[in-house]
Image (cartoon, grey):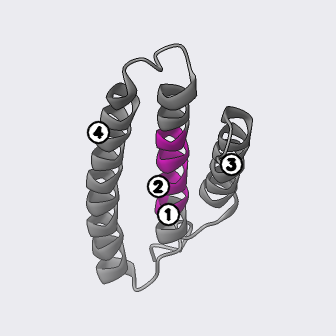
Amino acid sequence: MSAGLNLLLVASAALFAVGAFGAVARRSAVVMLIGTQFMFMAGALAFVAFARFGLGAEHGSAGAATALFAGAVAVAELAVGLVMAAVIYREHRSFALDADRG
């Protein structure tokens, strides 16, 4: 039994919704970065699903290659964001984005 296009797209949409909620609803920089990582991976899952079942199904490696590049960009974005969060924590002793600067 294999997962169909609809199931993969629903999973991708659910993962994107969780990531969007994490990026919008929290005040912590780390949780926001994890939320954006979830949204990137939801997009990668959609790329792979469309490559497997979509219009370009005859070239099965195209979606996987795009997902690989999307994942690499997401990992690079996460690394830069974590460094920024570490600098914020070092200066303010808090990961809260709305912390007082006084």
Q: Nearer the viewer, mark 3 or mark 1?
A: 3
Q: Give whichever of discs 4 and 2 has the lower sequence position.
A: 2
Q: Nearer the viewer, residue 76 or 55?
A: 55
Q: Nearer the viewer, mark 4 or mark 1?
A: 4
Magenta run includes residue 47: no
Give how far across and how far down residue 42 sits, in percent. 55, 45
Q: Are marks 1 and 2 in contact (CB under 8 Å)?
A: yes
The residue under label 1 is 34
Q: Which residues are magenta?
A: 33-45
Q: Give whichever of discs 2 and 3 has the lower sequence position.
A: 3
The residue under label 4 is 69
68 relative to 53 in the view: left or right: left
Measured in 3D between alpha carbons, the distance from the residue under mark 4 to the one under mark 1, in whole angstroms, is 18 Å
In the rendered image, the vertical position of residue 80 relative to residue 52, given as above or below: below
Element carrying mark 2: helix
- Residue type pointed to by label 1: Ile
Q: Badge 4: how crowded within 10 Å, few (<14), some, or many (20+)?
A: few
- Residue type pointed to by label 2: Gln
Give how far across and how far down residue 19 sits, in percent. 61, 54
Measured in 3D between alpha carbons, the distance from the residue under mark 2 to the one under mark 3, in whole angstroms, is 15 Å
Measured in 3D between alpha carbons, the distance from the residue under mark 3 to the one under mark 4, in whole angstroms, is 20 Å
The residue under label 2 is 37
The residue under label 3 is 11
Q: Badge 1: how crowded within 10 Å, few (<14), some, or many (20+)?
A: some
Q: Are marks 3 and 1 in contact (CB under 8 Å)?
A: no
- Residue type pointed to by label 4: Phe
102 relative to 59 in the view: left or right: right
As drawn, which residue projects farthest toward the top?
55
Magenta run includes residue 41: yes
In the rendered image, the vertical position of residue 2 relative to residue 94, given as above or below: above
